[in-house]
Image: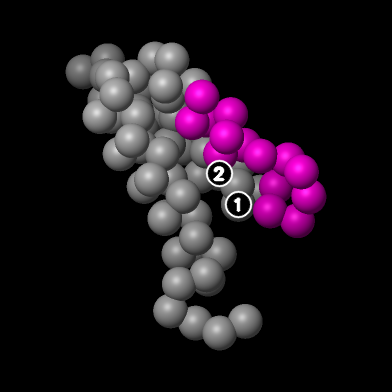
């Protein structure tokens, strides 16, 4: 149970941080969340959480399936 809560917490920190701080250059919350997940989660969970965080935030910001 604790592993799921940790993974969801790290995903939420990275996703919300990227959405909220999107307009500020050189402020990488995804990198910080990736390092945190590498420290507290097993290797396969780290990969899944990091990639899903990036893909979900890219979809929310409109980088997939549309023109800007």
Q: Is residue 26 magenta?
A: yes
Residues in magenta? 21-35
Task: Say what secondary structure mark 2 lies in.
Answer: helix
Please say if the residues under marks 2 and 1 sit with CB atoms less than 8 Å apart.
yes
- Rendered location of residue 32, percent (x, y): 58, 29
Task: Say what secondary structure mark 1 lies in.
Answer: helix
Q: Residue at x 49, y 31 (%)?
A: 34
Q: Quadrant of the C terminus?
A: bottom right
- Rendered location of residue 38, percent (x, y): 42, 22
Q: Residues within 10 Å of mark 1 (few under 14, many from 20)?
A: some
Examine the rendered structure and indicate whether residue 30 appears above or below residue 42: below
Q: Residue at x 51, y 24 (%)?
A: 35
Checking the image for residue 46, the label placed there is none
Tell me how the rendering is colored. Answer: one colour
Is residue 5 at all visible to an observer of this figure? no
Q: Where is mark 2, residue-wise?
A: 16
Q: Where is mark 1, residue-wise?
A: 19
Q: What is the quadrant of residue 65 in the picture?
A: bottom left
In the image: residue 20, left or right of residue 31: right
Q: Residues within 10 Å of mark 2 (few under 14, many from 20)?
A: some
Q: CA distance from mark 2 to mark 1?
A: 5 Å
Q: Quadrant of the N terminus?
A: top left
Q: 34 or 19: which is nearer to us?
A: 34
């Amino acid at each position: 149970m604790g592993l799921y809560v940790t993974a969801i917490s790290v995903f939420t920190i990275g996703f919300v941080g990227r959405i909220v701080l999107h307009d500020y250059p050189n402020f990488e919350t995804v990198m910080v969340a990736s390092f945190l997940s590498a420290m507290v989660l097993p290797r396969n969970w780290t990969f899944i959480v990091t990639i899903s965080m990036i893909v979900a935030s890219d979809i929310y910001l409109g980088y997939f399936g549309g023109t800007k």
